[in-house]
Amino acid sequence: MISLKGIFPPIPTPFDSDEAIDFDRLKSNLARWNGWPLDGYVVAGSTGESVSLSGTERVDLVRAVRSVLPRGKLLIAGAGLESTRATIELVGRMADAGADAVIVVTPGYFAPSVRPAGLVAHYRAIAAASSLPVILYSVPVYTHLDLPIEVVRELAAYPKVVGIKESGGSLAKITSLVDQTPQDFQVLVGSAGLLLGALMVGAVGCVPALGNLATSQIHDLMSAVQRGELALAREIQAKLVEPNELLTVRFGVAGVKAALDLVGLYGGPPRSPLQQLDEAELAILRAGLGRGGLI
Amino acid sequence: MISLKGIFPPIPTPFDSDEAIDFDRLKSNLARWNGWPLDGYVVAGSTGESVSLSGTERVDLVRAVRSVLPRGKLLIAGAGLESTRATIELVGRMADAGADAVIVVTPGYFAPSVRPAGLVAHYRAIAAASSLPVILYSVPVYTHLDLPIEVVRELAAYPKVVGIKESGGSLAKITSLVDQTPQDFQVLVGSAGLLLGALMVGAVGCVPALGNLATSQIHDLMSAVQRGELALAREIQAKLVEPNELLTVRFGVAGVKAALDLVGLYGGPPRSPLQQLDEAELAILRAGLGRGGLI
Amino acid sequence: MISLKGIFPPIPTPFDSDEAIDFDRLKSNLARWNGWPLDGYVVAGSTGESVSLSGTERVDLVRAVRSVLPRGKLLIAGAGLESTRATIELVGRMADAGADAVIVVTPGYFAPSVRPAGLVAHYRAIAAASSLPVILYSVPVYTHLDLPIEVVRELAAYPKVVGIKESGGSLAKITSLVDQTPQDFQVLVGSAGLLLGALMVGAVGCVPALGNLATSQIHDLMSAVQRGELALAREIQAKLVEPNELLTVRFGVAGVKAALDLVGLYGGPPRSPLQQLDEAELAILRAGLGRGGLI
Amino acid sequence: MISLKGIFPPIPTPFDSDEAIDFDRLKSNLARWNGWPLDGYVVAGSTGESVSLSGTERVDLVRAVRSVLPRGKLLIAGAGLESTRATIELVGRMADAGADAVIVVTPGYFAPSVRPAGLVAHYRAIAAASSLPVILYSVPVYTHLDLPIEVVRELAAYPKVVGIKESGGSLAKITSLVDQTPQDFQVLVGSAGLLLGALMVGAVGCVPALGNLATSQIHDLMSAVQRGELALAREIQAKLVEPNELLTVRFGVAGVKAALDLVGLYGGPPRSPLQQLDEAELAILRAGLGRGGLI
């Protein structure tokens, strides 16, 4: 049984100035991250610009991370595509490349006409075909499809479906996800902005973009909760909200990459049509990270 | 200094079969509620169908509640209208009628063209004119206007603006509201669905529609938090989510009234165009309240 | 049988510097408008800041307009409120004040829980009680409730329900409204931005905010259509789109009032929380009206 | 100079019961369509389930259509992907496969953080690299990104950017697109539901899902407009609205495929997670197509 307890940042994919994957930069980032209290990585997820990567690039990223991954850290591979059949194929390749689990975002392009039964069929077929544990992933800000609790409840009955990354921002939904699924179904919150509340209602871990740079703060928050030091947890949480908004709502992936550059890791450019932050945006980001104690 | 610590349900306005206010039913409900661990009432708020009441009816409701209000419970009067000038006038009448504080919903009809500066001007003028403490109220599901944190921060500097009822559902926003306002600015969460998380990040109380019937559960949750019994708090919280969704999202005021009828208080009909639940809806409501342990 | 063929601008309500209704300014505006090719006025509608007016103020406006209305122009009074009962009462007062018809906006505050059956009941009761012809009014940008075609179809069967002002911006819906209602049910388009298309599919008239200043252009467009001069109609239409966006989407009522000031009518301040345009906004407005040939 | 005058249906991609592309069915459909008054086809567009196809499958479709395409009909290939670099590569392959033009949907996954400058850079790079004419494509119902008029205006200056398919449903926007771009920039409306209005304001053609089965009606409408028989055009338009809603809003691609089956072409199953219509849905579709005179 795989444990999703802990912090699993969705790592950005580093590109060089020609927008090709820069595997050296990836490894230099990982050399740093490997020394931090992270429990694993999500590779080729939304923050990894999965939609701008080819299937082969996604698999290559997983292989590269695997090659430098310390024992005890999980490699979770983003394997969601718009069709069931393409997703199944990519899941298989991710298994071959050494992933420990796959995370599968809801298909979203046809959100207005995808039915709950279609979502159940989608994930059931993926789980049936997968040799790896499957983590559901709902992120309506990108997909405009909020995976319904009823669908999750049905899918949670499949042993291979081990959990969900919930990035919709509703603490009530997270509460229901924990409450209405079996004990061993693991709920991860997708944002550092509501981490304390999510832990309180039973989330076991998080997949926060902010975890790429604020690992120690997030780790301290989770430890404080475990020790029952709630005042301390609240204090840390409060400082994370603004940086989190900046990275996840205001600036997105380009903001995450700029933040990495600001803290001495490699961020670099996103792939077009995303563009690097301009000077004015950088100033806003720098000020917000400063107020959050992150630079 | 007024304390907003505790539970302040927004009480429905009881109507008879002609849709006239039924003051006898109001008082019989209050006779029951007065014996419960409630810290006060919000009268003529959204759940009180404020938009379907005349100014005079709203004032009459406040006077009626005042006449039977036990010492130690607060009477918070819903006084928001679409224009600053009409709101100021109603706030004055609410003070004369015996309210302890007013709660002022953001104007919403012109939401697409109301500017932050207009909101600051609105609330500043109201606070300046009011003899009572003023509570801000943001409820985008009805107003389609999410009161910006920057505006709240500016208004929190006015001594008469004592707090906010935040009903937008974002725990991250509640966290920021607590963190970015002075110590004595009090944040109330507008929904029982994220109460535990809200308390964790510093909310002092709640204004939950569900508080009209699930008082003891909500009270137990708040007490458990105060005693540090977080597992118990989580357990209570989990059972409140579905009933809360049913009352606030799915069925709205008609659902709150039907729920009151189901627990032996008086709900009765809402004012048209709202309609009483039909049999199929009632069955869904009954089942959900049952699963939540409320009937 | 009342005819809604033509142009019926929703006139703004002029306020003095204390935000009190300025009846002299209203009459001086009307003195100008009465000489233009307008077929009537909508008084106390959305653009008239109805939600910021008391019932008595709304009735007083109707009385004032009536007193200077030339024979042959219609006076359509905005009479919608959030509850059926309050709307019925206001409709009665509007009839006494001399309105020729009432226009009744959908209630919107409880949009998430108003059911189609509630909307049918609402308008049916209003029509039954009204001595005047009733015009439905759907404006989702303000009410967040798009009056369903099925509801309109059912209401169109009532003789007193003579038409609809459709401000939702969907030409497909306007097409269906014309097609699925009886011959004598009259469809008005609520915006000058899609006037040509709306006329093509059978709308008989318009209630455009832009009609307060661009009467001659709109009149010319409608005449060109009637004469079959479609190239000319298209040319006029194209110039109206940007001014229309500025008044209805970008700046709203404050923009309409500023535009009136720019063309030598009285606009003046809106009621707070709406605020007059600042210098930068005025410059944008002036440039856009200039490009549209309106100043 | 390529002419986009006329009807260019976005053809569905036929799958067999294993969800593999059925090229025989494709050709049998084309054998029928080739005899209809269509001016070309959009291959591997949204309705072609582009997001569920691999790049190779998209290219193979284009090659297959090319092999049976009569002289005088255009082959427009859907070549949009989420990143600029992947789109450029696919555009090149589409040229090699024999496409006459490419249509490039806006990237949408990162819609919340894509800036206008990023969109300009995206399309400019694609146009610079493409040997084929490029058609912009805005379809916010799927991408949640409404290509701004300012961006289109800037891109229309590039000779290789020959037009836009506008599927946002706003006639006002179509009016502005025609008015604010050079004479030779061609605007196509993406839906049969507002075709008459779009033609009136200067659209030259359409890319309607409904064109896969209602070709003769759409052709008659366009001919009637050209002959100035507007009453006839209106009558045809009115009957198309409901079928169009059913195919584009209510049932989406699965509905288009079911409709093809109903009229004797091959529709077949969509790729999962889309699912074939169930019996109840089919009955609704059949009734609506019947009222529209299409079956």
Image (cartoon, coloured by chain):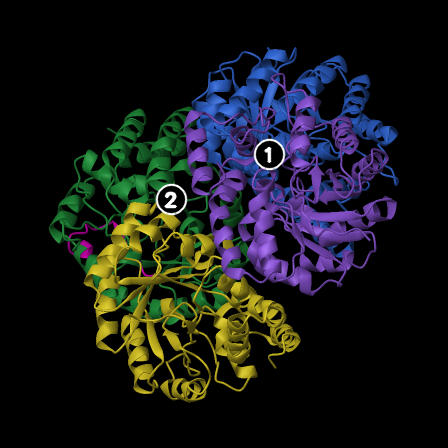
Chain colours: A green, B blue, C purple, D yellow
Report the chain holding disc 1: B
Please tell me which residue is depicted at 62% across the width and 38% down the height of the picture. Answer: B142
Task: Point out the image quarter for the N terminus of chain B.
Answer: top right
Residue at mark 2 to residue at mark 1: CA–CA distance: 38 Å
Please tell me which residue is depicted at 62% across the width and 15% down the height of the picture. Answer: B133
Report the chain holding disc 2: A
Q: What segment carries the magenta color? A: A65-80
Residue type at numbered disc 2: Gly
- Percent from the top left, x then y, of residue A45? 31, 53
Residue type at numbered disc 1: Gly
Looking at the rendered structure, the secondary structure element under dot 2 is strand
Q: Name the side, left or right, on which D210 lies relative to A244.
A: right
Task: Point out the image quarter for the C terminus of chain B.
Answer: top right
Please tell me which residue is depicted at 65% across the width and 61% down the height of the picture. Answer: C202
User: Where, by quadrant of the figure, is residue C274 drawn?
Assistant: top right
The answer to which of B234 and D127 lies nearer the viewer is D127
- Percent from the top left, x then y, of residue A186? 42, 51
Q: Is residue C21 visible?
A: no
Neighbours of disc 1 within 10 Å: few (<14), some (14-19), many (20+): many
The answer to which of B191 and D260 lies nearer the viewer is D260
Q: Circle 2 is placed at which residue position?
A: A205
Q: Circle 1 is placed at which residue position?
A: B108
Residue A69 belongs to magenta span: yes
